[in-house]
Amino acid sequence: MRKIIVSESLSLDGIFDAETMGQWAVPFYSEEREEIVRALILGADALLLGRTTYDIQAWYWPNQKGDKYGIANHKNSIPKYVVTSRPLQAQWNNSTIIQDNVLEEIARLKEQPGRNILIEGSAVLVQSLAQAGLIDNYQFLVHPSLAGNGKRFFKEGAGLTKLKLIESKPLSSGVVALSYEPSK
C-alpha cells in the first residue's frame, strides 16, 4: 500500500504562505535543506494537490528548463492528482482532476502499487485527509522565524490529531526537519 506523505515548510508560528516565504523561509535555505526536499520529491511517484497549490505549481514547474537536481523533470513527468470543486482544465501533463467522492478516490490511489504520494502545500486538503485517517506521514521543515501574519497551515477547528515523532534533525541553518506519523 502506498503512503501519503505531507511535505511542508513552516515558520515557527505555523505560517506556510508562499507569498511571504521570501521573508521567513528563504534566508534559511541551505544545500542540506534542499537535499531533504529533493529526497521527498524523488521518493514519490505521484503528487496530490489542492487547487491553489496545483495552480502555482502548474504555472512554475513546466517552465523550469534547468534541472540541476532532477526535481523539475520528475514533477513534470509523474502523475498529478488535483482536488478541486471549481472547474479546471488541467494543462500540466499527467494531471487528473478529482472532484467527486474525494476520500474514496484518494483511498483507491493509496491501494494502487507504487511509491509515495506527495502532498505539498494544500492545507485544506491535508486537514480533510487527516480527519479521514488517510495521511501516513508528515515531513515538516520548521524555520527559525516568527512570521506573525500569513496563511496558517493548521486552521482552528480542525480537530485533534495525535502524532508520533519518528525523526528530528536540526540543520546548520537553524531549520529543524521533523517527521511524524499519526498515532494509532
Image (cartoon, grey):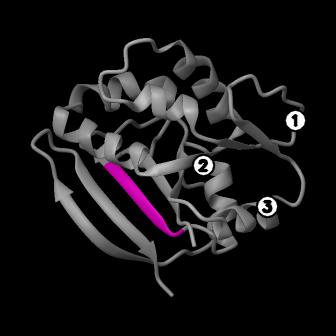
Give the residue at the far front of this rendering.
113
As measured in the structure, the alpha-carbon distance from the residue carrying label 2 to the one carrying label 1 is 17 Å
Residue holding disc 3: 105
User: Where, quadrant-wise, is the N terminus in this rendering?
Assistant: bottom right
* Residue 111 visible in the snapshot: yes
Magenta span has 140? yes
In the visual, does 65 lie left or right of 31? right
Say if 113 sits above or below 54 in the image.
below
Pick the residue in front: 16 or 51: 51
Say if 150 sits above or below 152 in the image.
above
Name the mark nearer the viewer: 3 or 1.
3
Residue holding disc 2: 123
Range of magenta residues: 136-141
Residue 102 image position (x, y, % from top left): 81, 58
What amino acid type should be assigned to the residue bearing mark 1? Arg
Residue depicted at 54% across the width and 74% down the height: 161
Residue holding disc 1: 86
Picture disc at residue 177: none
